[in-house]
Amino acid sequence: MQKVTPVVLNLIIINVLVWVAQLFFDMPSFALSSNIALYPIDSGLFKPYQLITHMFAHSSYSIRPDGMLGNVELFHILFNMYALWMFGTALENIWGPKKFLLFYLVCGLAAGVAQLFLSDAAAVGASGAIMGLLAAFAYLFPNVEFFILPFPFPIKAKYMVMIYAGIDLFGGIHPGAADNIAHFAHLGGLVMGLILVIIWNKTNRKTFY
């Protein structure tokens, strides 16, 4: 268990507060999620600010077949905030608050740009930025082991990032009928995270483990 770092803590707080606001204000009269999600450029709904806001929003409610709001969605934000704490805390301890925040935001922006150019679907979530964190963590700590369901054995970080990248690449190229995951956004954040950590590591060799 590791103590949460300042920027990671504040990012978690912001994400949770936005999600709670979505729960209260996602309604026909003022659909908050519809205003802060990232929409395709040719949809007529795209606004430049969505490149920022989408990475602080998450799924709030499921959508019923009749188009009305269904049950509260917990998994999306819980999984992302857990991953943010797990990978982000380690990276902020290495880089410091300012460098870590810059890394996180750049990965999130890269995820949004990838979504705009490679997908025709709207997107919300911090997943793209967090995939960047995963890429950096796997580069710096390649042999740290994790248990991932449904695998009954530990998987090293360097293999875990390959597995997730492969899943997103396949899902992006061959999306299922009910697939609502922004696979290309994930890949955009992951690639940007890998590029940044490789560049930064060349000038700071002591961070390589």
Image (cartoon, grey):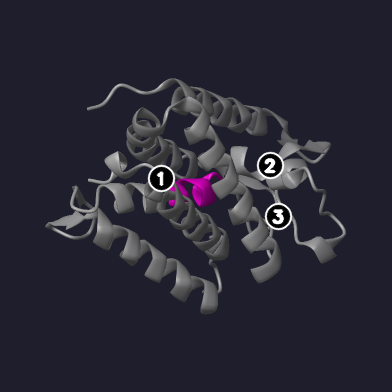
Q: CA distance from mark 3 to mark 1?
A: 52 Å
Q: Quadrant of the N terminus?
A: top left
- N-term mark: 3 or 2: 2
Instruction: Say what secondary structure mark 1 lies in.
Output: loop
Viewer-closest of 191 and 174: 191
Horizontal and vertical percent for residue 179?
A: 53, 66
Residue at image point 54% right, 68% down: 178
Q: Which residue is mark 2?
A: 52
> Is 202 situated left or right of 36 in this image?
left
- 126 is within the stretch colored magenta: yes
Residue 148 is situated, as x and y percent measured from the top left of the image, at 24, 53
Q: Front-most of 103 and 60?
A: 103
Callout 3 amino acid:
Gly
Nearest the camera: 138 or 99? 99
Question: Separation of disc 3 and disc 2 at Cα?
Answer: 27 Å
Q: Where residue 203 is drawn, which disc sits there?
A: 1
Q: Which residues are magenta?
A: 125-133
Q: Is 209 inside the magenta-drawn segment?
A: no
